[in-house]
Amino acid sequence: MDSTLNAAIIGFGAAGKIFHAPLLKGSRVIQLASVQSSNPNSKEWLNEHFPNAIVVDDLQKVLDDEHINIVIITTPNHTHFPIAKRALEAGKHVVVDKPFTISSKEAEHLIALAKSQQKVLTVYQNRRLDSDFKTVQSLVRQQTLGAILETTIHFDRYRPQVKTGTWRESNTDGAGIFYDLGPHLIDQALQLFGTPDSLYAHIGTQRAATAPDFFELQLYYKATKVILKAGMMVRETGPHYMLHGTKGSFVKYGMDVQEAALKAGKFPAEEAKWGIEPETIHGFLHTELNGHVFRGHIESKTGDYREFYQNLYEAISKQAALIVKPEEAAEVIYIIEKAIESNTLGKRIDII
């Protein structure tokens, strides 16, 4: 299969319109052909940016369309499993926005179903393609800091007012910051260091919220500790990444620039310097290289979320290995479950 694939986005809120559709504009291998949405503004937006795409009001119309190869699910978290199940049963390749599912049991069911259907199933863990994470991953793999002793990753925001009427901050399964930002940070930790031996979690609220709006998750390895933290009441943010090893340290302020660009309505295909961080937020490295001490800022690697969809095409058409394997995404959900258990029990618990 070498022809262009047709994709449909299910749900067209912020995730679909900001984090998925723009990545397909200008793509030569995956075309946005359809959107399932009840929002009357979706058609107007698509007419401007994707004039060949259609809007339908019923999921079944997408699943019955033999021209649709890929279904991209960007609906509320608790609906990921049933929609993905229906899409796989209809013979579609499936992309699920993070979190994969609410439970690891659901994730395992979808993985088995995808294998039986011989369809590609993956999860949109786009933060693997952030410029700063790519930089950190390179430093860890090259052992630039020596053996890593402690890593801290923060994903902080300042939103003192709870958004009423939104599913993300409602009292429903999969709502709240831990299912929203937790999958990003946990996935990054697993990519850097693998499965932890044990963990301790504090998940709670700092505002008058019904869903969690704060968490700190500590992952323990034989010689490494990883601290993952996110909250809505951080007006003055600290470092996004801090890594300390036997040879040196790396400290990084600021966030990858792609999200801000996408929220500003920019399209990667129309930007010559997409995913390139400004020097003002390059990370600071202090270590010893080949017997010489280095202390200074280093250029961040280039981030590009489009790599996810290019890889998806190659996985479908050329049987290439997925960037995000569903088994990896399922492990993220398992860690979330164990963290919730730790928070409930108020103690550190073993993973393996």
Image (cartoon, helix red, strand yellow):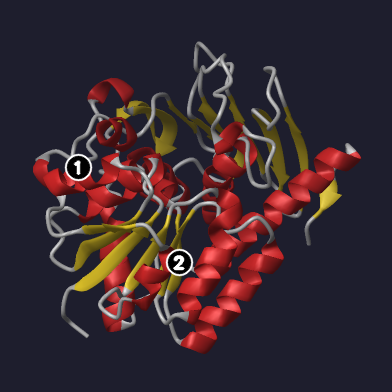
Quarter that holds the N terminus = bottom left
Query: Mark number for residue 122?
Result: 2
Q: Please state which of residues 186 and 28 is positioned toward the viewer in this rendering.
A: 28
Quarter that holds the C terminus = bottom right
Residue flagged by tag 1: what amino acid is it? Glu
Q: Mark 2 touching mark 1, by CB under 8 A?
A: no
Q: Please state which of residues 92 and 149 is positioned toward the viewer in this rendering.
A: 92
Query: Mark number for residue 44?
Result: 1
Q: Position of residue 72 (x, y in %)?
A: 38, 61
Mark 1 is surrounded, within 10 Å at the Cα level, by few (under 14), some (14 to 19) or many (20 or more) other residues, namely few
The residue tagged with tag 2: helix, strand or loop? Answer: strand
Q: Position of residue 295 (x, y in %)?
A: 37, 25
Q: Which of pointers 2 and 1 indicates the residue nearer the eye?
A: 1
The residue tagged with tag 1: helix, strand or loop? Answer: helix
Which residue occupies 54% across, 24% down?
163
Residue flagged by tag 2: what amino acid is it? Thr
Q: Position of residue 148 (x, y in %)?
A: 58, 43
Which residue occupies 86% across, 40% down?
344
Q: Left or right of 110: which side holds 199?
A: right
Q: Residue 312's quadrant in the figure? A: bottom left
Is residue 298 visible in this depiction of the protein? Answer: yes
Which residue occupies 42% across, 24% down?
253
Lower position in the chain sequence, tag 2 or tag 1:
1
Position above or below: 93 against 208? below
Q: Residue 190's quadrant in the figure? A: bottom right
Q: CA distance from mark 2 to mark 1?
A: 29 Å
Q: Left or right of 313: which side holds 336?
A: right
